[in-house]
Amino acid sequence: MRILYPVFFITLFLISSCVFAQDDFHKWLQKDQQDFQSFIEQEDKDFSNFLKQEWSPFKTEKGDVPDTSPKPVTIPKVPEKKTPPPPPKTPPKVLKNLPIPTKRPQPALIPLPKPDPAKPAVHFNYLDIPLSVEYKPAVPIDLSTGIQNKTLSKAWEAMSAPGYKPMIEQLQDMKRLLQLNDWGYLQLAQQFARTVYQNDANKQALLIWFVLNKSGYDTRVAYSKKSIYILFPSPDEIFDNKFVQINGTRYYFLQTLKPAFTLDKQVYTYRKNYKTATKPISMRIYKIPQLKREIVKKEFKFTFNHKPVQVPVQFDKDVVTFFKSYPQTDLKVYFAAPMSNEGNFSLLSALRTHVENMPETEAVNFLLRFVQTSFAYKTDDQQFGREKYLMPEETMYYPSSDCEDRSILFSYLVTHLLGLRVIGLDYPGHIATAVQFHTPVTGKTVTYKNMPFTICDPTYVNADAGMCMPQFKEVQPKIISLF
């Protein structure tokens, strides 16, 4: 028994120490959270006071436009060979152990956050997905005295009143669960704001501004006369989009905020950003959003080496819907974009059965013929009335496509199916590609990083690797680096 007494007291001491340590930890955590909340509240006060100061006038500038050289309305065609080429004596296997899925992906169940039913919430649809966000403004936004810096300062104070945190947390949870990129989150905030202030575009702009700043995005508002506008920077150029220069950075106008976007030559805004809001709005797509998943089935037909080929595919129409309002941005964004799980599996699986036993060059020519001849050709002006680059699934969905759309799709196929490096080629009024083969290929090449890349034109009908459109044979293209 005597031996047990020390053990008992040591155990009691350790338990007491743990209890006191845990209590100290909770006190520290509570104080830390209180300090952080005080910091946020002080930051809101400081920002509101800053907004009361004089705003500066900024001249609006027209956005850059992509290549204005006219695209070919009709495309040249190489006459088909009368007889198919003889098969090589020892055809090498094309495919390595590439990560092409072998099972059709199953739709993911998205556990979207649900607000407390006892608390007021806003119910809205985002790309036909019903969502609910806990929100009730503690203080209403008042613009009755006109739009000026002091009015907007009071609007910030109203929105940052206690009770807004669940709204931001739930919107950010939705961003993560729906796999939205920055632009997708901006659109989510916009749809939320449209529901809160259904008939007031100015209050919608203020709520979007607040949500994005509280989510860490460097977003600003500008005003002129009776209108409020959203401004945001982006690391990716956004074409044909008006902007202002603030501290040497382009801040683009969110043109989809109002159905008819009109803008004065001068707007008023501020130079200093909200302290914790530093992220630009990137146009890059790293994952395709998890949306409603409405499957579209199509079958593409073409001829290769005098044999008919059928390629059945299916893909998500929701992806097409998501990209309908996507601003036109750098071509690199489109070349680097992924496909949906369904589209990726369906298209790569259908094509793999044809190319897996082909020599490397023949496999590339097969993919060229698929892209060159399975899709009707129309310029963007003819199809959309404006310039619009298409993501791979959009090219499969819309009835027609043009040169950059085909180059983006072809690049995706060669990269993900054959594992070969591809670069983009930017000619006046035309986009093509070039492929780095493992063995030399006859035909025209370009040099990039001291390595030869063979020209492959997915628009030049029946053209094999190494063939260049006649009008571009003597033209040195700009290289679009894709790796």
Image (cartoon, grey):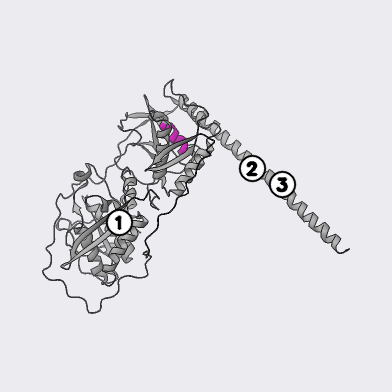
Please tell me whether mark 2 or mark 1 is closer to you in this view: 1
- Residue named by callout 2: 32
Q: Quadrant of the C terminus?
A: bottom left
Residue depicted at x 16% and y 72%: 85
Residue depicted at x 42% and y 37%: 192
In which image quadrant can residue 434 be found? bottom left
- Residue named by callout 3: 23
What SS does tag 1 mark?
Answer: strand
Q: Is residue 213 above or below residue 56?
A: below
- Residue named by callout 1: 314
What SS does tag 3 mark?
Answer: helix
- Numbered label attached to residue 26: none
Please tell me whether mark 3 or mark 1 is closer to you in this view: 1
Q: CA distance from mark 3 to mark 1?
A: 58 Å
Name the spot of residue 226 as percent of width and height, x first: 37, 24
Q: Is residue 247 visible?
A: no
Which residues lie in the magenta part? 204-211
Front residue of 186 and 100: 100
Q: Is residue 225 above or below residue 33?
A: above
Q: Is residue 95 visible?
A: yes
**Is residue 10 found inside the magenta-colored segment of the image?**
no
Name the spot of residue 19 as percent of width and height, x first: 74, 50
Near mark 2 (Cα within 10 A), the count class, few <14, some 14-19 or many ≥20, is few
Name the spot of residue 294 as percent of width and height, x first: 34, 50
> Which callout, 3 or 1, points at the residue further toward the start of the chain?
3
Q: Quadrant of the N terminus?
A: bottom right
Residue depicted at x 42% and y 21%: 146
| Main SS category, magenta section | helix
In which image quadrant can residue 183 be found? top left
Give left or right: position of 480 versus 3.
left
Please, what is the three-letter code of the amino acid marked with disc 3?
A: Asp
